[in-house]
Image (cartoon, helix red, strand yellow):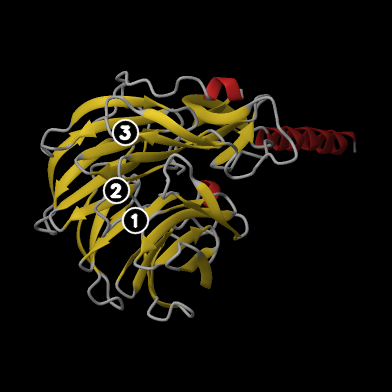
Amino acid sequence: MKSLANFFIVSIVILSQMSCLQDRCTDERVFTQYTPVNMTRAEFERSILLTSIRPLKDPGKMYFYQNYLFINEKGLGVHVYDLTDISSPQKIAFYDIPGNFDIAIKDHYLYADNVIDLITIDIADINAPKVVAREKDYLKQYVNFVPQTFYAYSVKTNVTQILTCENPNFNSSWFWGGVDDVFLQDATSGVINVKQTSTFSDTGISGSFARFTVVDNNLYVVGNSNLLGFDIQAPEKPALKSDNNLGWGIETIFPYKDKLFIGSSTGMFIFERKADGSVTLASTFTHARACDPIVVEGNTAYVTLRNGNRCSGFENQLDVIDVTNIYSPSLIMSYGMKNPHGLAVRDASVYLAEGDFGFKVLDAADPKNVTLITSKDDIHTYDMISLDKNTLFVIGDDGFYIYDVTDNSNPKVLSSIKPES
């Protein structure tokens, strides 16, 4: 009887030890840590337009104007390159603009976000930019409360963390953490990010992640929850004309003819533009929660949805939408993708960035049967600009590339701008 009791005691000890071993599992993982940098108003209003040359390290959005390429250094400012010879881009300046992620240009005036302000910069002399206007707190984020410091940008570093299985973030690809409320994202999970066939010679061309766009004498800007319209007939005195609340999760803006297509994390908004620049909501097209830049050609809109990171959702697909009737858009077909980001379209050819998987060239002549022409999987990409029928701009973590797409089945690199360590 005593030996039987001892057997049960030993068994309980062994089982409890096994349970402890199971509960104490660990996982060593590399995260990309985004540590926020805050600034006082005096700091971000400082002399911001230094034309010193700064290395390209963390490329953001791109914008093409006349023969100049502008590449955003996320949260820090804008690199300026001369593309007169597209086979050999020449860096000519860096505009130091704290808290900058987006720009748009009309005539020789550049509109940019500067932390919480909207500034207008005269770039008639590309090497001597001048701030000529400042709209403070243009998104009206701090109407009732003005903090001492404002978020400007994040510093990105790789960190290694050992997580135990008791940690609520054990299976997460990203999370907030630490005393400084830093954002950590699994280094293998991709990037967070973010008018493409312009008919206006006095404006530029942006990628599909644009949040600023200029049409005629109007600057349209999307915040996290609204669409703003500014009258810029007098560039030195931009005047707010409209403010449409759209709910949370607004991400991108794409102008096409007399329409504005707004991408959000839950769907697409279509606005009609009036002759005076005012806008009215025509319709909404709802999809599952996901990130979704939009481009349009003819009566067809192309929307990418991707999952992971802040995008949530479970879709990785290209949606092709019939917008013949803008008051009742309808889904034509969805096509599975790996990790779709930004995209461009020209003459029914869709160029689609796939993050770590490179980019695809698709034949969309038949929206019900979009087919793969070719893919390039040797670079990281997150946005595209179709400059003309022969030239494609591509940007991603690996830098900026210009491709000759005269033959869509065989894109050829003409030149590149690589990030510097």
| Residue linked to disc 3 | 123
Amino acid at the residue labelled 2: Gly
Characterize the local packing of mark 2: few (<14), some (14-19) or many (20 or more) Cα atoms within 10 angstroms: many
Q: What SS does tag 2 mark?
A: loop
1 or 2: tag closer to the N-terminus: 1
The answer to whether mark 2 and mark 3 are in CB contact below 8 A is no
Which residue corresponds to mark 2?
204
Position in image of residue 255 (x %, y %): 38, 61
Q: Is residue 142 above or below residue 279?
A: above
The residue that appears at 39% across and 34% down in the rendered structure is: 121
Residue 257, by quadrant, is bottom left
Task: Tell me where residue 295 appears, x and y as whole percent.
Answer: 35, 62
- The earlier-in-sequence mark between 2 and 3 is 3
Q: Residue at x 76, y 35 (%)?
A: 16
The mark closer to the camera, 3 or 1, is: 3
* Residue 108 drawn above or below residue 181: below
**Residue 127 image offset from top left, x and y in percent:** 27, 25
Q: Secondary structure at mark 3?
A: loop
CA gap, disc 3 and disc 1? 21 Å
Q: Is residue 81 visible?
A: yes
